[in-house]
Amino acid sequence: MSDLLERLRERGWRMTSQRRVVAEVLDGDHVHYTADEVHARAALRLPEISRATVYNTLGELVALGEVTEVCTDGRARRYDPNAHRPHQHLVCSGCGTIRDVHPLGDPLADLPAAGRFGFTVSGVEVTYRGLCPACA
């Protein structure tokens, strides 16, 4: 389970009912919802929550560095609450399911200095693709 709610409480983030429900929807392992999916799930818990509130809350969580935006299909941005745990993504080419994975080793170490073209590399994004058991 992600520790998003705990991190937000520690930061003293003002937890209105709308913000709380968005954070609760995002809290968990392997959560990578689009903004519309977050809104749909939040509205089940708090029917009066607006789409604008969800979008604004997601934007604030990204700006705080508590949630990261992930785009694996070139279209929809998804929101990942595991912003403080280094990981890569495993994506099903069939249904689009995304899972967080933690391979051994350091992907940054796999890029030799000669292949960095003088760049000071600050991060690495790796996406593994394949078919999940249901699509295989």
Image (tube, rainbow, N blue to C red):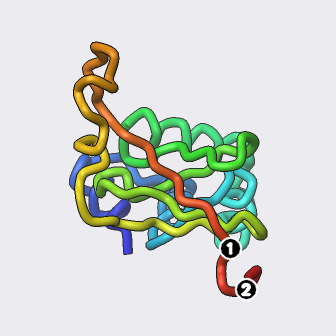
Residue that lies at the very extreme toward the top in this rendered image? 118
Left or right placement of residue 7 versus residue 54 in this view = left
As rendered, which of 105 and 78 lies closer to the eye?
105
Left or right placement of residue 125 versus residue 21 in this view = left
Percent x, y for residue 41? Answer: 69, 68
Give the numbered dot on residue 51: none
Give the numbered dot on residue 131: 1
Q: Report the residue marked by disc 2.
A: 134
Percent x, y for residue 53? Answer: 64, 44
As rendered, which of 60 and 98 lies closer to the eye?
98
Q: Quadrant of residue 85?
A: bottom left
Q: Which residue is drawn at the image coordinates 72% and 63% (left, top)?
A: 93
Q: Nearer the viewer, mark 2 or mark 1?
A: 1
Percent x, y for residue 131? Answer: 68, 73
Left or right placement of residue 94 versus residue 109 in this view = right
Percent x, y for residue 92? Answer: 67, 67
| Amino acid carrying mark 2 in the image | Ala
In the rendered image, which quarter contains the N terminus? bottom left
Q: Residues within 10 Å of mark 2 (few under 14, many from 20)?
A: few
Q: Residues within 10 Å of mark 1 (few under 14, many from 20)?
A: some
- Residue 75 higher or lower than 89, as above or below: above
Residue that lies at the very extreme toward the bottom in this rendered image? 134
Q: Which residue is drawn at the image coordinates 43% and 33% (left, top)?
A: 63
Q: Which residue is drawn at the image coordinates 59% and 65% (left, top)?
A: 98
As rendered, which of 87 and 27 lies closer to the eye?
87
In the rendered image, which quarter contains the C terminus? bottom right
| Amino acid carrying mark 1 in the image | Leu
Dot 2 falls on a residue whose secondary structure is loop
